[in-house]
């Protein structure tokens, strides 16, 4: 999404160009998008960080201009060097994935760290995941969990799920099903599929301070199944059969 948080203190003219461009982008009109690109360029030349970042999006997506991933990265970097957290997070992704540039994990970490210091949730999560996986960085669960918490405090769904999983399995923390349920619920509320499935299991077995509630488990398994979770259809069929059997026994 376009960067909107004002952090730079550029000229009034650059800010005027930026705001006019944002209005044009909102119209979803191709001619308007092309005009917006030019206005963002004019503002970017004056050092307007949000305009530079938005040019990165427009070149990345090919909106109002021919798609050019390398140019998108250049604009993100211009903005990132001025301290815009969103641009720093985007630069991290481009370097990690090799979008428009050779993969460079050290550069990815450099930009993720800068954005994470500003509590940017995506950057904190992405950096945490690198430490959690331990494939390209030395594994460090303490750092990973600290970064996941930064993101989870802002209701980042994948961070909430990962924390739930860590507490569920006692991975890097003492096993705590109550905390697992807490984070699974946060992630489930944000429609995280695996969190819904795991929360369903906790309702089914009555874990983490929850009462056994097969109807709630059924609802969560159904939501997870509709979203494509591979284990959810079998779990859903089983709980439906158990509910039917229990209802029949009560008649």
Image (spheres, rainbow, N blue to C red):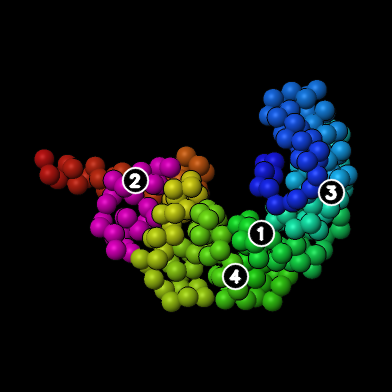
Residue 83 visible somewhere in the drawing: yes
Q: What stretch is highlighted in magenta?
A: 199-223
Badge 2 is on which residue? 218
Rendering coords of residue 164 (x, y %): 46, 63
User: Is 187 on the left or on the right of 61, as rendered?
Assistant: left
Q: Earlier in the sequence, mark 3 or mark 4?
A: 3
Total labels: the figure holds 4
Numbered circle sitting on residue 123:
1
- Relative to 246, residue 110 above or below: below
Q: Nearer the viewer, mark 1 or mark 4?
A: 1
Q: Which of marks 3 and 2 is nearer the N terminus?
A: 3
Q: Is the magenta stretch mostly helix, strand or loop?
A: helix
Q: Which of marks 3 and 2 is in front?
A: 3
Q: Which of marks 1 and 4 is nearer the N terminus?
A: 1
Badge 4 is on which residue? 144
Label 3 neighbour load within 10 Å: few <14, some 14-19, many 20+: some
SS for tag 2?
Answer: helix
Residue shown at 37%/56% (left/top)? 201
Badge 3 is on which residue? 47
Label 4 neighbour load within 10 Å: few <14, some 14-19, many 20+: many
Q: Earlier in the sequence, mark 4 or mark 2?
A: 4
Q: Give the Cα distance between marks 3 and 4.
A: 34 Å
């Amino acid at each position: 999404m376009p960067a909107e948080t004002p952090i730079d203190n550029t000229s009034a003219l650059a800010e005027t160009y930026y705001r006019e461009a944002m209005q044009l982008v909102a119209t979803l009109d191709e001619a308007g998008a092309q005009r917006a690109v030019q206005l963002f360029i004019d503002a970017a030349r004056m050092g307007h960080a949000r305009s530079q970042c938005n040019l990165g999006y427009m070149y990345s997506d090919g909106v109002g201009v021919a798609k050019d991933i390398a140019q998108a990265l250049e604009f993100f970097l211009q903005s990132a060097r001025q301290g815009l957290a969103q641009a720093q997070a985007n630069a991290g992704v481009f370097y990690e994935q090799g979008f428009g540039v050779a993969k460079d994990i050290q550069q990815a970490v450099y930009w993720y760290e800068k954005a994470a210091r500003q509590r940017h949730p995506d950057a904190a999560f992405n950096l945490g995941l690198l430490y959690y996986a331990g494939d390209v960085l030395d594994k460090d669960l303490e750092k990973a969990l600290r970064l996941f918490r930064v993101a989870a405090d802002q209701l980042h769904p994948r961070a909430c799920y990962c924390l739930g999983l860590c507490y569920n399995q006692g991975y890097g923390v003492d096993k705590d099903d109550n905390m697992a349920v807490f984070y699974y619920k946060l992630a489930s509320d944000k429609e995280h599929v695996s969190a819904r499935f795991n929360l369903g299991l906790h309702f089914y077995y009555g874990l983490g301070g929850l009462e056994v509630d097969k109807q709630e488990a059924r609802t969560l398994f159904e939501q997870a199944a509709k979203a494509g979770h591979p284990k959810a259809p079998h779990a859903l069929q089983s709980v439906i059969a158990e509910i039917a059997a229990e209802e029949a026994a009560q008649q």
